[in-house]
Image (cartoon, grey):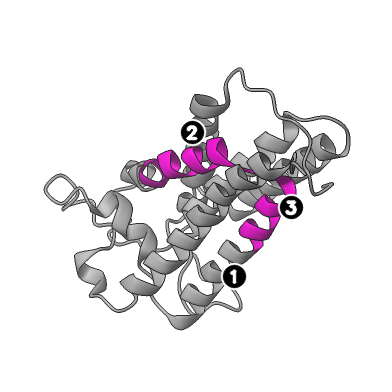
Amino acid sequence: MVDAWAPRRAAGRDWLLLLALLAKLSLLAWLLPAAALDWQPGLIAHQPWRLLSAAFVHWTPTHLAANLAGCVVLAALGWRAGLGRREALAGLIALPLTQLGLALRPELAHYGGLSGELHALVVIAGLSLLLRRGRERAVGAAVLAGLAIKLVLEQPLGPVLRATPGFDFPVAPLAHLSGALAGLLAAGLTMRGHRFPGSPHGT
């Protein structure tokens, strides 16, 4: 008997593989010296790998755990929504763009963390759902609206670092805005003109 959903599930694995890769690289970077990997605007011209590696640097166990939890949530959302190759490709494109946006605020002398990329993935997931029909479109709109409210409340154009209750590290709201914009750009590059079928999981 032919499994009609097999190609769709195979494509969905790309999204899961991306989230697994982000989590594994974050765990690996935890074992390496942060100073060799984090975002430092004065070094980026000569050490361009920091456009990627900065995302995997985490300052405290709480910081790492929070972003790993974000990976799990987005993996579950992506599996439920049937996100696949196009969304995963958009996520890869957004990764360096997220850090590149930090150059707008050179006073942010150091940055590390996956939260900017996770915000990009939320935008990509939300837009993918928004391009569908029925309940999936409503879910996509709700996801994007919630993210927009979060970004406004964080005041990302204010101080580059902000103490946040419950976290033992300073948050850089600019990275969240940069990630969201990077996700928007990456989604525009990869999803233009593509029609999305409904999710096999009934989101």
Mark 2 nearby-residue class (10 Å; few <14, some 14–19, many ≥20):
many
Look at label 1 and name its amino acid: Ala
Distance (Cα) linking label 1 and label 3: 17 Å
What is the residue that sits farthest to the left in this orientation?
Answer: 46
Please give left or right for residue 199 compared with residue 85 in the image: right
Q: Nearer the viewer, residue 42 or 116?
A: 116
Q: Position of residue 125 (x, y in %)?
A: 64, 43
- Residue 186: mark: 2
Report the residue marked by disc 1: 69
Distance (Cα) linking label 2 and label 3: 22 Å
Residue at 59% x, 42% y: name it. 11
What residue span does the magenta drawing correspond to? 73-98
Q: Relative to 203, is 24 above or below?
A: below
Work out which quarter of the rendered image holds the N terminus and state it.
top right
Q: Relative to 126, is 33 above or below?
A: below
Q: Disc 2 on helix, strand or loop?
A: helix
Mark 3 nearby-residue class (10 Å; few <14, some 14–19, many ≥20):
some
Look at label 3 and name its amino acid: Arg
Q: Position of residue 179 (x, y in %)?
A: 49, 46
Name which quarter of the figure residue 86 lies in: top right
Residue 60 in view in this figure: yes
Report the residue marked by disc 3: 80
Please give left or right for residue 142 compared with residue 108 in the image: right
Is 30 one of the magenta-colored residues? no
Residue 173 in view in this figure: no
Q: Nearer the viewer, residue 149 or 200?
A: 200
Is 81 one of the magenta-colored residues? yes
Q: Looking at the image, is mark 1 or mark 3 nearer the viewer?
A: 3
